[in-house]
């Protein structure tokens, strides 16, 4: 049986842990609200861009002059995987689940004999991938210093991807991030950025009523939108990721707080028992001592 | 509102502006164009320039956009997708001039063509911004 003092110390230490996890949960909750608002505010742009792009793309995919960003380079050899994770830990399985998905893709591609390159966004993903695939990681973009995620940050990543693609160092680009479904459910997702994954044909058909006029012409517009779309998609993924991270952290910290509470309860019970036992023992000693006289 | 145009200006970060106007003038890549109610559907890229919102014959709002795409939809709706958009009244001349100077220096210092091209487009953007401040 541990002594009374050590039990008391144990209870106090669990109590302070609980205070920390509770505070982290509150912080995550308030950050989550902000991240969600940002994600919602960014939605109209991405949606309209997507719709415009699909309308244009549907017409262009058949022709030979279609830009490479849309139809790809025609090769399927070099795969660039952009793995977006968080900068901090203590958020449940958030980082690991994204990395796990990426890992599965990497293994499949390697087995198929493809060349894989990894671009990490966020420190945690790099730390986890470095052990097994250190030689495949070409660079890491850290967002640690970024207070509020802005479009410029996404543009930085987008430009990096585009320049790799333009120099023929990637044929297919896939982005890994976690889609925010709800506070308790985030879905790790793989999204192909280049060539663009188009939805089924019937979905496009009802997109627009009258055929719009294009100025200067369809190709010029497409050439303008496509590179921009990469940044927009990255930005959306980053926003979703930010919301997911906070959601995951919130539920992880909620669990931790509850566990600490249970532990305190158990420890308190054994502390009280122990105290009672000592009192009883002392009483017995006194009584039997008095009887002996 | 059948005879009015609904303008929405969207940036990746948020919806910047949603107003009803009589006419909207947009800086299209091939030249400025005005949009009245019941305009035919149109998609156009924009050059760095000024969006003007008309109320009757008067300009009520002027906004600078650094390029983007405009989409005119049926039902007198106009959507502008722009990465950067600022109200002209909120632009500070001195700051733009400073940024222009910096960009020029960066342009001259640039070592590879990609970076130089990037700075060149930035300079173009800033010059258009200055012009728009000086405009009517």
Image: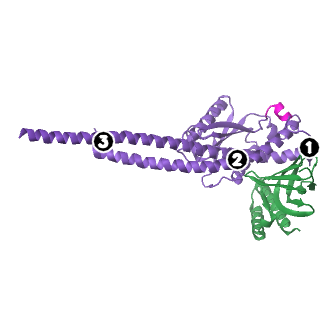
Chain colours: A purple, B green
- Residue extending farthest left: A293
Quadrant placement of the C terminus of chain A: top left
Left or right, B57 with respect to A92, comes to right
**Range drawn in magenta:** A199-205
Q: Are marks 3 and 2 on the same chain?
A: yes
Pointers 1 and 3 in contact (CB under 8 A)?
no
Is A43 covered by the magenta stretch? no
- Tell me which label, 1 or 3, sits earlier in the chain: 1
Q: CA distance from mark 1 to mark 2?
A: 28 Å
Q: Residues within 10 Å of mark 3 (few under 14, many from 20)?
A: few
Say the numbered circle drawn on residue A212. Answer: 1
Disc ID at residue A28: none
Residue A272 is tagged as 3
Judging from the image, mark 1 belongs to the subunit labelled A
Q: Main secondary structure of the magenta part?
A: helix
* Along the viewing direction, whichever of A119 and A147 lies nearer the viewer: A147
Residue A120 visible (yes or no): no
- The residues bearing labels 3 and 2 have C-alpha atoms spaced at a distance of 52 Å
Q: Nearer the viewer, mark 1 or mark 2?
A: 2
Name the subunit of mark 3: A
Residue topped by disc 2: A40
Q: Chain of mark 2?
A: A
Q: Residue at x 29, y 39 (%)?
A: A273
Which of the two residues, B70 or A171, is positioned nearer the viewer here?
B70
Q: Position of residue A190 (x, y in %)?
A: 68, 36
Task: Same chain for labels 1 and 3? Say yes or no.
Answer: yes
Q: Secondary structure at mark 2?
A: helix
């Amino acid at each position: 049986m541990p002594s009374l003092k050590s039990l008391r110390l144990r209870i106090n230490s669990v109590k302070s842990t609980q205070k920390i996890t509770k505070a982290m949960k509150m912080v995550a909750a308030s950050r989550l609200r902000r991240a969600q608002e940002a994600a919602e505010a960014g939605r109209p742009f991405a949606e309209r861009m997507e719709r415009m792009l699909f309308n244009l793309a549907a017409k262009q995919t058949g022709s030979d002059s279609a830009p490479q960003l849309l139809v790809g380079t025609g090769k399927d050899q070099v795969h660039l995987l952009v793995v977006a994770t968080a900068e901090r830990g203590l958020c449940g399985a958030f980082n690991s689940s994204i990395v796990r998905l990426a890992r599965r893709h990497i293994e499949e591609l390697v087995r198929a004999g493809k060349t894989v390159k990894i671009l990490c966004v966020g420190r945690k993903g790099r730390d986890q991938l470095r052990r097994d695939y250190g030689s495949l990681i070409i660079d890491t973009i850290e967002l640690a210093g970024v207070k509020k995620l802005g479009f410029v940050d996404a543009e930085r990543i987008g430009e990096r991807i585009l320049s790799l693609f333009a120099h023929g160092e990637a044929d297919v680009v896939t982005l890994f991030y976690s889609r925010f479904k709800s506070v308790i459910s985030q879905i790790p997702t793989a999204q192909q950025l280049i060539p663009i994954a188009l939805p089924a044909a019937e979905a496009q058909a009802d997109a627009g009523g009258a055929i719009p006029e294009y100025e200067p012409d369809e190709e010029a517009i497409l050439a303008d939108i496509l590179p921009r779309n990469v940044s927009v998609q990255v930005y959306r993924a980053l926003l979703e990721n930010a919301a997911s991270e906070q959601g995951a952290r919130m539920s992880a910290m909620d669990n931790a707080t509850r566990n600490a509470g249970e532990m305190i309860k158990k420890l308190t019970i054994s502390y009280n028992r122990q105290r009672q036992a000592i009192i009883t023992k002392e009483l017995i000693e006194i009584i039997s001592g008095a009887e002996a006289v | 509102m059948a005879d009015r145009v609904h303008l929405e200006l969207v940036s990746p970060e948020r919806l910047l502006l949603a107003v009803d106007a009589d006419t909207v003038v947009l800086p299209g890549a091939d030249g400025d164009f005005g949009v009245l109610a019941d305009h035919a559907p149109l998609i156009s890229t924009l050059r760095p320039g000024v969006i003007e919102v008309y109320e009757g014959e008067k300009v009520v709002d002027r906004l600078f956009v650094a390029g983007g795409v405009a989409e005119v939809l049926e039902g007198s709706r106009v959507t502008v997708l722009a990465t950067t958009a600022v109200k002209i009244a909120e632009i500070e001349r001195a700051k733009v001039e400073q940024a222009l100077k910096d960009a020029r220096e960066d342009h001259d210092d640039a070592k590879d063509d990609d970076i130089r091209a990037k700075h060149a487009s930035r300079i173009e953007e800033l010059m258009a911004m200055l012009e728009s401040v000086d405009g009517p």
